Image (cartoon, rainbow, N blue to C red):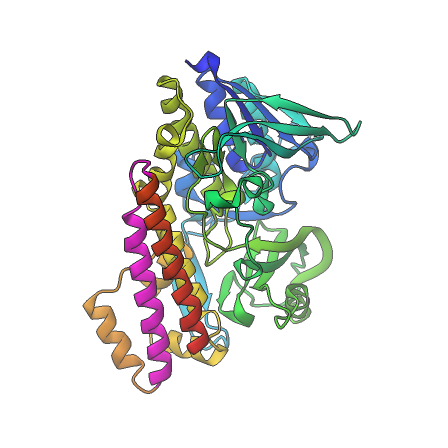
């Protein structure tokens, strides 16, 4: 049936390209519309990506040594042109510091630092080589709808595409439309509100991030080392050596008028470290999505991928790995649906099951979002106290930074009680966060495994109530 299925992908992000590549490889007619340009695709900086996601989508991660080695590690060819997607410096373990630098933890950092622009080009190249058509300077601005207004009745039948160079628009029919338009979710938010999956992300589901890659001043005497400063200024701050000549440093804060400008945090840090020069190589920043996925990632003829589906790790904002896994799962569901000659919720529901239940990514991210909702107002003193008392342990930080929710056990609970007995209000907040996260994690593992309108409605209603409780508990605390 694959030759009868026409697929349109809105956006050439990491998830959309994996989706297009895998479907084109399976023989589907795939067109990707991207409003940007090939040469500037992706962020102009390097970013941490999960090794597991890279390997699962066909990119062998380099060996976890002090220096990354392998065919995809960045170098130059015979003509001096840069090659590869991985930075040379490896991070099998990352030092995570308390906000006041009074304590540190050793976190198993299951990421590899990847040049996002080089990765973006490689993903586009792979999609094209598989047979997908990628149209740059074309923006998908609307969806074509038919049927009713509920999730089970509405059908996406195509898109409206604008040629940015000429300004002309055209309507194009498709059997499957994928929304990979980033956190604006241009297509998903145009579905009827009654589907329950069309809401825009709210302001409190974002962070603000700034990062800069600078030349390293090798002559400076400066003991600064790779580290991640956890909980600093409602967010985090980091410094990483990319290679012998380049340093990446940045900060992220909560999206709130009361939060400091992350660029000011970065500039102040650089001013205290002479090893970081004033010569800027790359960088940028802006909003970073840390919210939860919509209740369904599918409708009839429709799938949502990447930031449009909030496939980002809430504690770090890392989203490229989750997006690539989302693209992989979505493609598998479409291939399965096409084998039955269908494109409805029932046929595509496999994508939801894989994201929320089978892989546990959706469940982990949702539970971590609940923790973040309640705990993000902790003071520097509170977080530093948790570090010193080892309530925030190496294992707990390793899990949360790597996108995993840790179910509490009796020894951990006992240690938390003993270590935090002098701060009862902090213990109450920790208990509220852990309880909320556990309830949400288990609730997501009970996600409907097949499409049923009544079961889905009941599940979504309970989900909304559980998350509303995290906001009220935060306010009460």
Q: Quadrant of residue 409?
A: bottom left
Can residue 87 be seen here? The reply is no
Q: Nearer the viewer, residue 375 or 339?
A: 339
**Which residue occupies the foreground of this view, 212 or 449?**
449
Q: Quadrant of the C terminus?
A: bottom left
Q: Is residue 463 visible?
A: yes
Main SS class of the magenta portion in the image: helix
Q: Quadrant of the N terminus?
A: top left
Residue 61, quarter of the rendered image: top left
How far across and down, in percent of the image, does residue 11 sit?
60, 34
- Decide which of 5, 217 is in the foreground and name it: 5
Q: Give the magenta-colored segment's residue range.
A: 423-452
Q: Give the answer, above or below, for where 235 lies relative to 300.
A: below
Q: Quick one: which residue is furthest to the front in this view?
A: 148
Is 173 in front, or is 307? 173
Asked if residue 94 lies in the magenta stretch, the reply is no
Quick one: which residue is furthest to the left in this view?
A: 410
**In the rendering, at what x and y percent does residue 135 appear?**
66, 25
């Amino acid at each position: 049936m694959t030759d009868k299925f026409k697929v349109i992908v809105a956006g050439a992000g990491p998830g959309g390209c994996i989706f297009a590549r895998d479907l084109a490889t399976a023989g589907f007619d795939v067109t990707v519309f991207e409003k940007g340009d090939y040469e500037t695709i992706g962020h102009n900086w390097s970013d941490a990506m999960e090794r597991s996601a890279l390997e699962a989508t066909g990119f062998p991660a380099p060996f976890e040594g002090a220096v990354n080695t392998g065919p995809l590690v960045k170098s130059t060819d015979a003509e001096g042109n840069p090659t590869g997607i991985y930075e040379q410096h490896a991070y099998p373990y990352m030092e995570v510091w308390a906000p006041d630098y009074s304590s540190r933890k050793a976190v198993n950092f299951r990421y590899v630092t990847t040049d996002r622009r080089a990765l973006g080009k490689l993903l586009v190249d792979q999609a094209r080589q598989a047979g997908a058509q990628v149209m740059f300077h074309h923006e998908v601005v609307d969806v074509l709808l038919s049927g009713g207004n509920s999730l089970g009745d509405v059908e996406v039948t195509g898109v409206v595409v604008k040629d940015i160079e000429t300004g002309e628009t055209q309507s194009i029919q498709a059997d499957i439309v994928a929304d990979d338009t980033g956190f604006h979710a241009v297509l998903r938010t145009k579905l009827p509100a009654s589907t329950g999956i069309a809401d825009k992300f709210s302001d409190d589901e974002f962070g603000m991030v700034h990062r800069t890659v600078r030349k390293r001043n090798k002559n400076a005497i400066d003991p600064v080392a790779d580290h991640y400063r956890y909980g600093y200024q409602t967010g985090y701050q980091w410094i990483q050596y990319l290679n012998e000549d380049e340093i990446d440093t940045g900060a992220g804060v909560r999206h709130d008028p009361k939060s400091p400008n992350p660029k000011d945090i970065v500039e102040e840090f650089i001013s205290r470290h002479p090893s970081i020069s004033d010569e800027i190589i790359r960088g940028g920043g802006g909003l970073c999505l840390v919210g939860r996925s919509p209740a369904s990632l599918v409708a009839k003829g429709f799938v949502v991928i990447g930031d449009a589906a909030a496939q980002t790790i809430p504690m770090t904002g890392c989203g490229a790995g989750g997006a690539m896994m989302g693209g992989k799962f979505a493609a598998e569901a479409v291939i399965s649906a096409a084998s039955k000659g269908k494109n409805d919720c029932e046929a595509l529901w496999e994508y939801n099951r894989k994201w929320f239940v089978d892989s546990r990514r959706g469940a982990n991210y949702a539970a971590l979002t609940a923790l973040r909702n309640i705990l993000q107002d902790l003071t520097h003193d509170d977080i530093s106290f948790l570090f010193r008392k080892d309530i925030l342990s190496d294992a707990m930080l390793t899990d949360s930074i790597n996108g995993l929710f840790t179910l509490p056990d009796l020894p951990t609970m006992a240690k938390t009680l003993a270590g935090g007995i002098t701060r009862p209000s902090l213990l109450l907040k920790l208990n509220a966060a852990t309880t909320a996260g556990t309830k949400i994690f288990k609730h997501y593992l009970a996600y409907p495994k097949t499409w049923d309108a009544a079961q889905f409605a009941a599940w979504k209603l309970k989900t909304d109530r559980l998350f509303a409780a995290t906001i009220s508990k935060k306010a009460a605390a």
